[in-house]
Amino acid sequence: MAKGKKKKKKGKKGGAAAEEVPLGTKLQYIGVGMVLGVAAAPTVRKWIERARPEIDKLLERLTAQAEELAENAGDFMATARGRVSAKSHDDTN
């Protein structure tokens, strides 16, 4: 007796497939998106202009902190190198 494989029924998961959506509906979606984009653009532009000075201040502060950390790391490495070379010099003598 050979065991037959049972075929599983494939049900729709979620929305319709892309091929099943008519072209007219797709064009309506695109049109609504464009209208909403054009209507919202001035508001979004104003928000960006208001936020730009704050973002510039934040980036300037982050840059200054990064430069300070780099200087501190350089000083730390120079001190460590000096101690290692002094210790190795003392060990050889």
Image (cartoon, grey):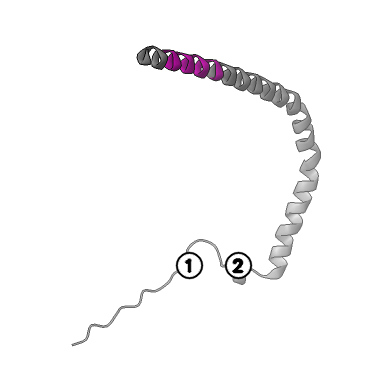
Residue at the extreme front: 93
Return the residue nearer the eye: 81 or 85: 85
Q: Residue furthest bottom?
A: 1
| Residue 41 in which image quadrant | top right
Task: State the image coordinates of residue 77 (x, y, percent, origin top left).
Answer: 50, 19
| Most distant residue in the left direction | 1
Q: Quadrant of the N terminus?
A: bottom left
Tell me the kind of residue under disc 1: Lys
The answer to whether residue 92 is left or right of residue 53 is left
In magenta, the rendered stretch is 74-86
Which mark, residue 12?
A: 1
Q: CA distance from mark 1 to mark 2?
A: 13 Å
Q: Name which residue lies at 71% across and 23% down.
A: 54
Q: Picture coordinates of residue 14 (x, y %)?
A: 50, 61
Disc 1 crowd, CA 10 A, few/some/many (<14, 14-19, 20+) = few
The dominant secondary structure in magenta is helix
Q: What residue would you read off at disc 2?
A: 18
Rendered view: 81 above or below 31? above
Residue 53 in which image quadrant? top right
At label 2, which amino acid type do we have? Ala
Q: Nearer the viewer, mark 1 or mark 2?
A: 2
In the depicted structure, whether residue 6 falls above or below residue 31: below
Which residue shows up at 73% across the image and 61% down it? 28
Horizontally, is 9 left or right of 59 in the view? left
Kindly state the secondary structure of the residue where label 1 is placed. loop
Q: Are marks 1 and 2 in contact (CB under 8 Å)?
A: no
Apparent side of residue 51 relative to residue 16 in the rendered image (left or right): right
